[in-house]
Amino acid sequence: MMDPVVLDSALDIGFKTVPTLILVGMLALFLGVGYFFRVAAVDELWVAGRSIGSVENGMAIGANWMSAASYLGVAGLIATIGYFGLAYVVGWTTGYFILLIFMAAQFRRFGKYTAPDFVGDRFYSDWARGIAAFTTLVIAFVYAVGQASGMGLMSQYIFGVSYETGVILLMAVTIGYVALSGMLGTTKNMAIQYIILIIAFTLGLYATGWAQGWSLAVPYLEAGPQVAEAASLEAQLVEPFAFTSYYGWIALTFSLIVGTCGLPHVLVRFYTVDNERTARWSTVWGLFFICLLYWGTATYAAFGGLLYADGPGDGSFMDMPGGDADSIVLLTAQLAELPEWLVGLVAAGAVAAALATTAGLFITASSAAAHDIYTNLYKENATQREQLIVGRSTILGIGILTTIIGLNPPALIGELVAMSFAIAGSIFFPVFFLGLWWEKTTREGAIAGMLVGMVISFGAILNDTAIPMYTGVETAVIPEVAAYLPGTASALIGVPVVFAVIIVVSLLTEEPPEDVKRLVRQCHSPEPMHQMDSAEDVAADGGSPADD
């Protein structure tokens, strides 16, 4: 039997009436929206009928991105590992610029349902589709475990229940409304969730600054004295390489950048809009909404660090337990002695963040199973009803598995999410990028590249995290390998290796069919596409002379 998780945390654990009412009301709203926008067609289940506008999709991108890792984990990482933790802010933000410039519009022009759908059709291979679908399921699972951990932490504070009960309760709600509403209702909910989380996060930060007399109007710019005071307590806060090397910072930042460009639940957002122009503007709006939250994470770390050192930390904060680090945003509001309803609102914002990201992950996992594996690889004439049943069963299955592992997570929230980025960066980013920009990329090259990416990224996680945790070993199986190929940052080595494998194998094998090369050219055509068109539609009509 699994041992119960005992969190060493300074959080005021116990039932709280007003925060409970806020959270229950919020969950009821999500379920209601999910029911109102429930779907009966696969087009609405996977891509919301391609009906989402740029601002709404930008908010959904923001909510999808503002996971428990962003809302809770980033501030905790900065508070415990200092400026090194800024790698998460730099990496996750820079990745969206690459998406905006090189991939968002091109993906929309290609016009499929899922990331594995793109891989399968672009590389004219069921094997490639199957590998991509499997990788999508793994990424969704690893990423979602971190969100389950965040839900458990917040449930302890609000409901006063055990960590395990909180994980089970909130994961059950997530499974329920995602299975009911599909992508359409999930997107509507994401827009609402973004509004809730950004208000809660920002209000908590402002109120802490006011209550402590640290800031008045713009805490992000007024927090300099508090950062200096925190650094006087913990000099390592402003020494980014005190805990690890320069190589470690570069490797982590690079992995987060390319991982952003390879995450299936991010890319599928570009399929929910009607054309490539809306896809580009969705990315711009998404960056804006993401920036609003990331701007405050370092300020939360400074405010929270000082309050922690003045309270339970007894003069220090960088060695706080993992439970406190993962809940530092909430702890900051609590230690600042803000009203209980306001602290509860901050906790509800964290739950909204975890729910939004988990919902997006479950949708991509279900579409990979139902659309790519069941329909395209197993039963081509599957009915819509059969696809919906498989998709909803997948949501239930991966939800249960995530809940079980989330009861005893193998790492901190931010670390778990970083591992999923390393997987996405090593396996998917080279395939997506070359698939869109180099028409001579072949089926054999893509498959070889993805398999090499799997060996590198999965091997790194097994070496320094999975095997040590489940065997009781305190260090990595091969410490020398872990020093240069950590599970959270394996893409720095993985991506160039996979790029080289794809290019070499593609040059040594037969070029792709002409219709596939024409499809790639159409993704870069200067001619704007009509609404709801895809490159396949235009290429089938003959395209324009410029496309050839």
Image (cartoon, rainbow, N blue to C red):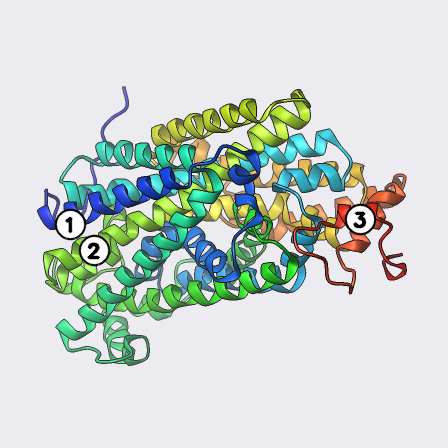
Give the labeled residue for mark 2: 345
**Which numbered disc flags the more N-terminal residue, 2 or 3?**
2
Q: Is residue 204 above or below residue 347?
A: below
From the viewer's perspective, is 235 left or right of 45?
Answer: left
Residue 492 lies, in percent from the top left, at 60, 53
Residue 19 is marked as 1
Which residue is at a point 34% across and 59% down the rendered structure image? 195
Secondary structure of residue under mark 2: helix
- Circle 3 packing at 10 Å, graded few (<14), some (14-19), many (20+), is many
Quadrant of the rendering where the C terminus is positioned: bottom right
- Circle 1 packing at 10 Å, graded few (<14), some (14-19), many (20+), is many
**Which numbered disc flags the more N-terminal residue, 1 or 2?**
1
Nearer the observer, 145 or 28:
28
Residue 21 lies, in percent from the top left, at 15, 46
Give the labeled residue for mark 3: 519
Residue 222 lies, in percent from the top left, at 28, 80
Which of the 4 image quarters holds residue 35? Answer: top left
Q: Is residue 90 above or below residue 503?
A: below
